[in-house]
Image (cartoon, rainbow, N blue to C red):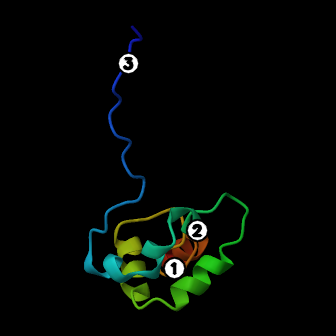
Amino acid sequence: MPITKTLPPIPSTAPTPATPWQWDALCAQTGPDFFFPEPGTSVRDAKRLCGACEGRAACLEYALANDERFGVWGGLSEQERKALRRG
């Protein structure tokens, strides 16, 4: 008789929206790879999508308040947010 082992379910890698703007954000419909690309790849398309999103301002505010250091948030890259914080 073969031995079988039941594995626990694999959790979803997609985060559950925590704030109201995240429910309607366009990024919630595309997936994280689009906004967290491999180093050295373009974020142009992600930034273009952010530009059309009604939650862009709230997203940027969230990223700055929570010191998000990676990915595109509120239409800005890591470097752009860093420069904005420095003023």
Measured along the vertical axis of the image, is residue 33 above or below residue 63?
above
Secondary element under disc 1, as helix, strand or loop, is helix
Q: Residues within 10 Å of mark 3 (few under 14, many from 20)?
A: few
Q: Residue at x 53, y 82 (%)?
A: 75
Tell me the number on the disc at residue 84.
1
Q: Residue at x 56, y 84 (%)?
A: 49
Q: Nearer the viewer, residue 17 or 68?
A: 17
Label 2: which secondary element:
helix
What type is the residue that disc 3 sits on? Thr
The residue pinned by badge 3 equals: 4
Residue beneath the point at 46% across and 81% down? 26
* Amino acid found under the numbered disc labelled 1: Leu
- In x, y percent, where is residue 72? 54, 72
Residue 34, labelled with which disc? 2
Of the residues tagged 2 and 3, which is closer to the observer? 3
Disc 3 element: loop
